[in-house]
Amino acid sequence: MKTTGEGTAAKPARATRALRTPGGLSVRLDVRAVTVVVLLLVAALAASVVLIGTGDFPIPAADVVRTLMGDGNPGQEFIVNELRLPRVLVGLLVGASLGLGGALFQAISRNPLGSPDILGLGQGATAGALVMIVLFSGSATEVTMGALVGGLVTGMAIYLLAWKRGVHGYRLVLVGIGVSAIVTAVNGYLITKADLVDASRAVVWMTGSLSGRDWAQVWPLLALCAVLLPLVLANGRGLRMMEMGDDVSNALGVRVERVRMLLMVSAVLLTAAATAAAGPVSFVALTAPQLARRLTRSPGPNLLPSLCMGAALLVTADWVSQRTFGADQLPVGVVTGVVGGGYLLWLLVAERRAGRI
């Protein structure tokens, strides 16, 4: 191991591999990060196959794979393709959206607590859904649209309130916590004004659940991810430079405010769409980026590892929610809340010991 002039041991270089495209562009890949992404994808797919086979009519994993390939019997095809596959796909897409959105917010705020759960975007989406449920007795589609609009409006409000010659991470987190408290109070008021039926419906939605999800939730979320993922990855280099500070990023040619606004809008859209599809599934956006970073041991936003970690986490949590209490299924938001709440306490203790809070 090499040593510096002062005699301290230098950190070993990370294993990387350079790839050259046909156009002559050289791309350097972090071997460990790529390995983590591949393993997380395999884990998410394996958990999905197990989850599809879980239920009142169990289906072996081999039969699930055969059915997905179009070689199952009619009964299995109906159960897999019409009843269980949409739920699993919504879980994968919601988890991926929350993981990616959380990684973006944490990178933009430069704070491990800067996730949609803490900043109040989930509460904003909940407020939009509650308005449609309590005031208008809206349909499922109207509730989804209300949640999407509520999340977007809350994200815009946080950005504008945090703006002062630019948006800085510490101010963004503080403003988000304040907005979250206000919106939570509004949500409580709406619940108290609802009748028993609407209040029960609202409480069920607020727990976050994948139960009853069908293809109507899959396609819009899939289309949004297909549009936003390339956009986010294309700006990943600028995001990584922004972690060195706005002045350094500007000196390196990054249009900081433009990139920050573009990525914040993308993160808000991902979070709002995920909440609209499954309700406020808590703490996936907080824990997935942190767990991904610990696995890759790589600096930077770790966008793809966070996306894959979010998908694997939520599908696994959904399996746990179905198997823990037998016939009495828990909403997946309860499972993620228990796990994520414990992780948040551990993170706060770690940050305090490090002297950062």
Image: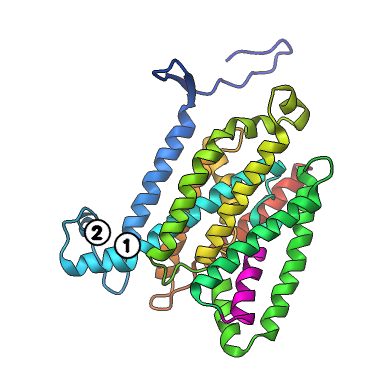
Residue 208's spot in the image, x, y percent?
54, 68
Mark 2–mark 1 distance (CA, rounded to whole Å): 7 Å
Farthest bottom residue in view: 196
Which residue does the numbered mark 1 point to in the structure image? 52
Q: Main secondary structure of the magenta part?
A: helix
Q: Image point 62% across, 53% down: which residue?
A: 268
Q: Image point 61% across, 32% down: which residue?
A: 299
Q: Are marks 2 and 1 in contact (CB under 8 Å)?
A: yes
Residue 192's spot in the image, x, y percent?
70, 84
Report the quarter where the N terminus lies. top right
Which residue does the numbered mark 2 point to in the structure image? 64
Report crowding for label 1: few under 14, some 14 to 19, many 20 or more residues within 10 A (C-alpha): many
Q: Image point 32% across, 69% down: which residue?
A: 83
Magenta-highlighted residues:
122-137
The correct choice, above or below, for 7 with respect to 103 in the image is: above
Q: Image point 74% across, 54% down: which residue?
A: 158
The reply to whether residue 247 is in sight is yes
Which is nearer the N-term, disc 2 or disc 1?
Answer: 1
